[in-house]
Image: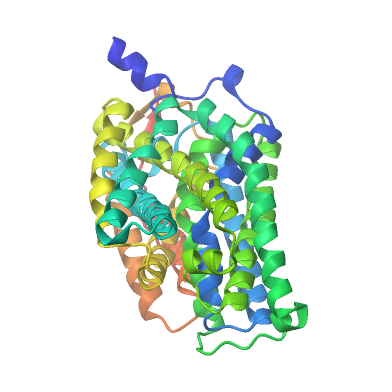
Amino acid sequence: MEKEKQIDKEYSLSTVPQEERKSYASLTIIWMGFVFVVTSMMAGGGLAEGLDFQHILLATLIGNVFLCLIACLVSYIACKTGLTFALMTRYSFGEKGSRIASFFVPIVNLGWYTIQAATYGHFVATVLHCGQVGEYICMALSAVIMGIFSFKGIKAITILGYVAIPAIIFLSLGTSLKGINMVGLAGVIGFTPEGSISLGSGITAIIGTWILSTATCIADIMRYAKSTKAAVGATLTGLLIGNVFMILCGAITTIAVGTSDLTEVLLAMGLVIPSLILMTTNIFTTNASNLYSTSLNLSNALKTDRKKIIVVLLVLSALATLTKPYQIGFLFSFLDLLGTVVPPLAGIILVDFYLLHKKNYPMLEETEFKNFNVMTWISWVVSIVLANVLPIGLPSLTGLVLGGIIYFILMKLTGKKVFRKIGE
């Protein structure tokens, strides 16, 4: 009984009750804390290696509009149902199918968590001149220490956000202004990169930076919304203001210093202490939410206390940091993968809720689910393959649309029912 109580403390296996719902301000703080992350700055720096400033702006805006569309639709579902992303997938994937799908998000989330922990550890080791062995130790310790807030749940993450976000905004803005001062505003606007990447690749990289969170993790936050208006408002604020801000900060500082290695950028500006504060507040807020979401998904998949799951994840992440995943080449390969694999999953869930069930899921506690729905897996795999083969449009958008269309057609043709309301 005690074990069930612990698991349900964060409503990881049940609907969030109305008395626990939060306002727009609280949700914005939590989501902003998630969005304000150095990997967005690193993505912006990566864009500056192959795009001029005008195309950086265009890629950033187009990518974030796409992300907003998905995030708002998912946030609406989360608010209406009060469910985690893992529980939402039961309505389309089935009871046991949902558990399998729930493993995908934690695996990718753990990758994000590890990249950010390694980035922070690399920065600290560089500042302190720790050497190679010292860097490994710093990266592994960073992965472990960042998990503390996720143990305490959504309330601790909210408090962390209130403390960290003002510092992140101030210091990020400060580094950007210093970058502009170094090369001049004309130098930023008239910037010409040495390398070259296509606008489509830039947009895909921006989408890849946040597609996982906007399609999945955001549900774990917005299920606490008091209203759909609060959920959608917080979502838009975080992406159109927070994420755009962080990407452009990363691009401007890279233009000024000439490297996309964030650690080298910050140290080259002579902002050692401010940069340490920026990196600490920035990564800790995001990784706390990241690990929290991961533990919720695995709690659904394994029916296990999420705190025990967190301990295992921290050990795995600490070991994974030793591969140095903070390197920009690794990051962009990871983002490219996310940008093609995750969107079809979002397409399936959106079509299931909005089109097949007309925005009306019965309460989780009043619903009986079948074990599997093979149509979801066929739709997901086929859409991923086609998105990478078809020479049209952006792979992310193509995958999203195809995933939804294929799933809709298969479900209509087969007439398959994944769940029924108990008593009907």
Residue at the spot 30% in from the left edge and 37% down from the top edge: 298
State the image coordinates of residue 366 (x, y, percent, origin top left). 42, 22
Q: Is residue 291 left or right of residue 324?
A: right
Residue at the extreme top? 1
Residue at the extreme front? 129
Judging depth in this view, the residue of 416 and 324 nearest the camera is: 324
Residue at the spot 48% in from the left edge and 68% down from the top edge: 264
The image shows residue 252, relative to residue 220, as above or below, that is below
Residue at the spot 58% in from the left edge and 30% down from the top edge: 159
The answer to which quarter of the image holds residue 377 is: bottom left
The image shows residue 373, relative to residue 63, as above or below, that is above
Judging depth in this view, the residue of 335 and 365 nearest the camera is: 335
Residue at the spot 45% in from the left edge and 60% down from the top edge: 343
Of the 4 image quadrants, the one containing the C terminus is top left
Judging depth in this view, the residue of 401 and 166 nearest the camera is: 166
Residue 384 appears anywhere in the view? yes
Residue 370 appears anywhere in the view? no
The answer to which quarter of the image holds residue 141 is: top left
Judging depth in this view, the residue of 285 and 349 nearest the camera is: 285
State the image coordinates of residue 322 (x, y, percent, origin top left). 25, 57
Q: How many marks?
A: 0
State the image coordinates of residue 122 (x, y, percent, origin top left). 38, 58
**Colouring:** rainbow
State the image coordinates of residue 77 (x, y, percent, origin top left). 55, 40
The image shows residue 193, relative to residue 232, as above or below, that is below
Of the 4 image quadrants, the one containing the N terminus is top left
